[in-house]
Amino acid sequence: MSRFSEITRKNFSDSDKKRDAGLTTPDNIERYDDIVYGADEVWNLLDLYRPKECDGKKLPVIVSVHGGGWVYGDKDVYQYYCMSLAQRGFAVV
């Protein structure tokens, strides 16, 4: 990995940790973590967020794909953003 990539990862991580400090899963969100969707049980994992009041109902689905230019990011980085979308009536993967 290049020095630039290392610096970018650290800066982005520090910023994300500040943004998410103290955040928790909202009481009105049902979350399912680390659902295996492929052959590799380490890399093929997804999380699902749904509003609790919609239990058992079909919902429109948003598939969140994080950015990061192959340098930074994973499904945990945007979990609170995804839960915010779920609070608006979506199932978010």
Image (tube, rainbow, N blue to C red):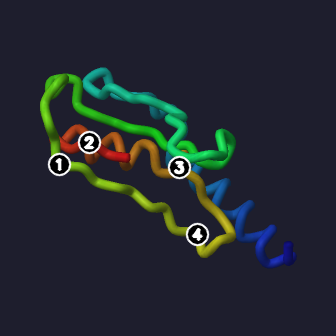
Question: Identity of the amino acid at label 2?
Answer: Ala
Residue 60 drawn at (x, y percent): 17, 48
- The answer to whether the residues at label 3 and label 2 have Cβ atoms under 8 Å apart is no
Q: Is mark 3 on a helix, strand or loop?
A: loop
Question: Identity of the amino acid at label 1?
Answer: Pro
Q: How far apart are marks 4 and 3 (CA)?
A: 11 Å
Quadrant assignment, res 7 = bottom right
Ranked by sequence position, the earlier of labels 3 and 1 is: 1
Residue, disc 3: 75
Q: Distance between the residues labelled 3 and 1?
A: 20 Å
Q: Residue 68 got which mark?
A: 4
Residue 83 drawn at (x, y percent): 34, 40
Q: Distance between the residues labelled 3 and 2?
A: 15 Å
Task: Answer left or right for 26 relative to 79.
Answer: left
- Label 4: how many Cα within 10 Å (few below 14, some 14–19, many 20+): few
Residue, disc 2: 91
Question: Identity of the amino acid at label 3?
Answer: Lys
Which of label 2 and label 4 is nearer to you? 2
Residue 13 drawn at (x, y percent): 66, 55
Ranked by sequence position, the earlier of labels 4 and 1 is: 1
Task: Answer left or right for 53 relative to 61.
Answer: left
- The answer to whether the residues at label 1 and label 2 have Cβ atoms under 8 Å apart is yes
- The answer to whether the residues at label 4 and label 1 have Cβ atoms under 8 Å apart is no
- Label 3: how many Cα within 10 Å (few below 14, some 14–19, many 20+): some
* Residue ID at (53%, 49%): 75
- The answer to whether the residues at label 2 and label 4 have Cβ atoms under 8 Å apart is no
Task: Note whether 34 is above or below 18 in the view shown.
Answer: above
Q: Distance between the residues labelled 1 and 2?
A: 6 Å
Ranked by sequence position, the earlier of labels 1 and 2 is: 1
Quadrant assignment for the N terminus: bottom right
Residue, disc 1: 60
